């Protein structure tokens, strides 16, 4: 950001990052490397009051995004250095295999959350953020607008989050009862052994999701 005349908001964003880390730590016990998700559930229930704190942060963050836009979007130095620079057309973006904000900034309205209809995204009111110019400014505008749209999704998800068990008890049947390998000292503390895993049937499976920087795909091969 320093090279394009917008270093100040880069440091402002650290302020919001700390608040996000605080929410992560309250829910998972860790600021990073959370190890929170489980097959069919999560490791622990959310602490009392966490949802309200997260909603409060969402309201606060929207005001900060407005601040970022005031400092960046109408900054003449920034605009001079990004507008019309690094133009990528829609056909080029597809041929080069671009995805995510890079693709959407080139006029292609492609978001896997809309295309593949996975998880609960169809239940929320939100739109694909895109621009048609394909330059560095368009890529910035897509990303900054996705901040606001992401908050919109988060607010709807938090307001509709269901109660009930936080873990899938049925999945426990896959665990080997009494298998001491999970408690092996070399596995838990020394990392000399690979993690115990489930045995997959002989088949192949590819799944993809819309990650912050584009398409994230996982290809599993069972043997």
Image (cartoon, grey):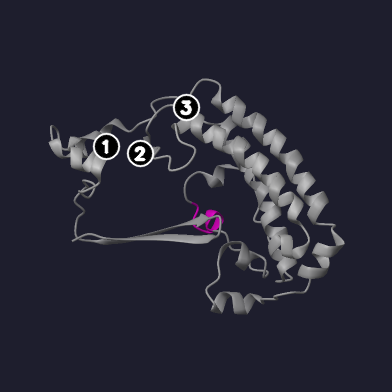
Compared to residue 155, the image places residue 222 above or below, namely below
Using the rendered view, name the quadrant where residue 84 is placed.
bottom right
Using the rendered view, name the quadrant where residue 212 is placed.
bottom right
Q: Nearer the viewer, mark 1 or mark 3?
A: 3
Residue 180 visible in rendering: yes
Compared to residue 186, the image places residue 80 above or below, namely below
Labels 2 & 3 near each other (Cβ < 8 A): no
Q: Is residue 97 magenta?
A: no
Name the foreground residue: 161 vs 28: 28
Mark 1 or mark 3: whose residue is earlier in sequence:
3
Compared to residue 39, the image places residue 82 above or below, namely below
Q: Which residue is mark 3?
A: 46
Could you tell whether 2 is left or right of 53 in the image? Answer: right
Q: Which residue is mark 2?
A: 40
How far is mark 1 from mark 3, CA to CA?
A: 20 Å
Residue plotted at (47% across, 50% down): 118
Compared to residue 72, the image places residue 160 above or below, namely above
Q: Which residues are magenta?
A: 112-117
């Amino acid at each position: 950001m320093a090279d394009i005349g917008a270093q100040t908001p880069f440091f402002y964003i650290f302020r919001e990052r700390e608040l996000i880390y605080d929410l992560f730590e309250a829910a998972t016990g860790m600021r990073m490397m959370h190890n929170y998700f489980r097959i069919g559930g999560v490791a622990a229930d959310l602490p009392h009051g966490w949802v309200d704190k997260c909603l409060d942060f969402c309201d606060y963050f929207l005001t900060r995004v407005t601040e970022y836009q005031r400092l960046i979007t109408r900054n003449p130095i920034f605009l001079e250095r990004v507008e019309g620079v690094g133009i990528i057309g829609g056909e080029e973006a597809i041929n080069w295999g671009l995805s995510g904000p890079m693709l959407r900034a080139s006029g292609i309205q492609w978001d896997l959350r809309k295309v593949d209809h996975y998880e609960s995204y169809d239940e929320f009111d939100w739109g694909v953020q895109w621009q048609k110019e394909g330059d560095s400014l368009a890529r910035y505008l897509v990303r900054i607008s996705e901040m606001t749209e992401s908050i919109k999704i988060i607010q709807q998800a938090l307001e509709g989050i269901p109660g009930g068990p936080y873990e899938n008890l049925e999945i426990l049947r896959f665990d080997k009862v009494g298998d001491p390998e999970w408690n092996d000292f070399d596995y838990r503390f020394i990392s000399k052994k690979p993690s115990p895993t489930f045995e997959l049937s002989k088949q192949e499976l590819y799944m993809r999701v819309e990650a912050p920087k584009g398409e994230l795909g996982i290809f599993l091969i069972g043997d």
